[in-house]
Amino acid sequence: MEQFEDEKYKKAQKKVKELKGFYSHLTVYIVINLILLGLQLLVFQNGTLGVEVPRWSMFTTPFFWGIGLFFHGLYVFQDRFRFFKDWEERKIQEYMEKDEEEMKNTWD
């Protein structure tokens, strides 16, 4: 029994570390991208600082980093997506039982 409790504790502890890691990742993403945006808007007046700076550079970091953050979130919150799969399975079972009941009523 104690081993079961220990396993549950370790599993919960791992989940908390994953959540903490995701929220840290999200915080760093927001802070760094705000700094980059501020630099673009304040330092590079009109997009230039002696030389022309392409505007697409302002969006590449948030875009590609955002893709990585999205997949990190999918990994961390995957158990929440299982709810939909479980719901789907319950609905399928419900419809199968309903059809079976209708067939029984038809033959009776």
Image: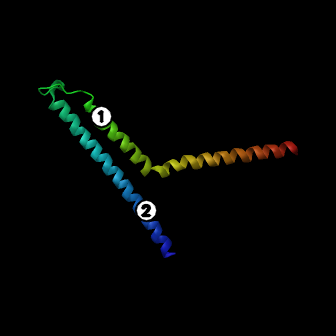
> Residue 29 at what x, y percent from top left?
29, 43
Most extreme residue toward the left, as rendered? 50
Front-most of residues 51 and 20: 51
Query: Residue at (45%, 71%) from the top-left corner?
Result: 6
State the image quarter where residue 10 is shown: bottom left
Mark drawn on residue 12: 2
Which of discs 1 and 2 lies nearer the camera? The answer is 1
Q: Could you tell me which secondary element the residue under label 2 belongs to?
A: helix
Mark 1 or 2, nearer chain start: 2
Instruction: Quote the CA–CA distance across marks 1 and 2.
Output: 36 Å
Q: Amino acid at mark 1?
A: Thr
Tally of marks:
2
Query: Residue at (20%, 32%) from the top-left corner?
Result: 40
Whether residues under marks 1 and 2 lie with C-beta atoms below 8 angstroms apart, the answer is: no
Q: Could you tell me which secondary element the residue under label 1 belongs to?
A: helix
For mark 1, what is the residue?
A: 60
Q: Is residue 59 above or below residue 81?
A: above
Front-most of residues 51 and 36: 51
